[in-house]
């Protein structure tokens, strides 16, 4: 189920191997409306964050190369302070949560794009969902939502190769999960009626909105 992937630390250039899950061996149990995947067996998500066993730097595969200024900030605010943990082997879900929190910390220190911090927060929310910690799940879904909205407004979506329909669908879904009904309805309606929207996201939006309305009726 596992293999050892070669990695090089973005901060100290140390070369090491770290555990990853063989995607071809995974078995999907179900997919949530916000694209969270539940697996029977090892979850690849647990291994998304790489932790350098030498200096402790936590990073995501899409982090940018560090500038001298970012290195200096990292050294002061992170590298000189943390206890280096060995996270190159198999991880428990608690350890996976810890690695995502470290990555959110390093992302904020180096001022990474909101696209990165949004994805980190969303995945962290999924991990909390898996251990049924709803308060923490909602807290990180809200952080993800705030960052996705910022990203839509101020960052270059094309450069990130993000599918805009997918992003709007995700923002709509997160709004619904967080109880922001008016925003959710506006965005789902934009997807359902939009002439340029891809059939895939149009149909996902129709299904999600329909499910939500049925849930509401069942609740009455
Ligand atoms: Zn390192």
Image (cartoon, rainbow, N blue to C red):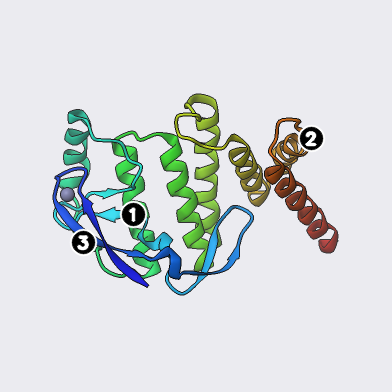
Q: Secondary structure at mark 2?
A: helix
**Residue drawn at point x = 29 percent, y = 54 percent:** 50
Furthest-front residue in this view: 24
| Corner quadrant of residue 67 | top left
Q: Where 64 falls versus 9 (above or below)? A: above
In-front residue for pair 207/130? 207
Q: Tell me the quarter of the image containing the N terminus.
A: bottom left
In-front residue for pair 137/171? 171
Q: Tell me the quarter of the image containing the C terminus.
A: bottom right
- Nearer the observer, disc 1 or disc 2? 2
Q: Secondary structure at mark 1?
A: loop
Q: Position of residue 140 (x, y in %)?
A: 49, 50
| Corner quadrant of residue 25 | bottom left
Q: Where 23 falls versus 81 (above or below)? A: below
Residue that numbered label 2 is attached to = 193
**Residue drawn at point x = 75 percent, y = 40 percent:** 185
Label 2 Cα crowd, 10 Å radius (few <14 / some 14-19 / many 20+)? few
C-alpha distance separating marks 1 and 2: 38 Å
Q: Is mark 1 within 8 Å of ligand 1?
A: no
**Residue drawn at point x = 60 percent, y = 41 percent:** 166
Residue that numbered label 3 is attached to = 85
Label 1 Cα crowd, 10 Å radius (few <14 / some 14-19 / many 20+)? many
- Nearer the observer, disc 3 or disc 2? 2
Residue that numbered label 1 is attached to = 49
Task: First in sequence, mark 3 or 2: give its number.
Answer: 3
Q: Is mark 2 within 8 Å of ligand 1?
A: no
Q: Position of residue 136 (x, y in %)?
A: 50, 57
Label 3 Cα crowd, 10 Å radius (few <14 / some 14-19 / many 20+)? some
C-alpha distance separating marks 1 and 3: 13 Å
């Amino acid at each position: 189920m596992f293999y050892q992937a070669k990695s090089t630390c973005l901060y100290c250039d140390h070369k090491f191997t770290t555990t990853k899950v063989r995607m071809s061996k995974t078995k999907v149990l179900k997919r949530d409306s916000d694209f969270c995947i539940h697996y029977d067996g090892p979850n690849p998500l647990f291994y998304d964050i790489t932790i350098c066993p030498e200096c402790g730097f936590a990073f995501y595969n899409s982090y940018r190369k560090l500038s001298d200024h970012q290195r200096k900030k990292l050294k002061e605010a992170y590298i000189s302070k943390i206890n280096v943990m060995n996270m190159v082997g198999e991880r428990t879900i608690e350890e996976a949560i810890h690695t995502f929190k470290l990555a959110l910390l390093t992302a904020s220190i180096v001022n990474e794009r909101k696209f990165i911090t949004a994805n980190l927060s969303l995945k962290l929310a999924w991990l909390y969902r898996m251990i049924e910690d709803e308060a923490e799940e909602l807290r990180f879904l809200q952080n993800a939502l705030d960052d996705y909205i910022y990203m839509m407004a101020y960052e270059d979506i094309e450069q990130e190769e993000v599918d805009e329909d997918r992003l709007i669908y995700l923002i709509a879904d997160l709004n619904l999960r967080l109880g922001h009904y008016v925003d959710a309805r506006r965005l789902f309606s934009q997807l359902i009626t939009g002439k340029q929207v891809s059939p895939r996201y149009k149909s996902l939006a129709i299904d999600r909105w329909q499910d939500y309305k049925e849930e509401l009726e069942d609740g009455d």
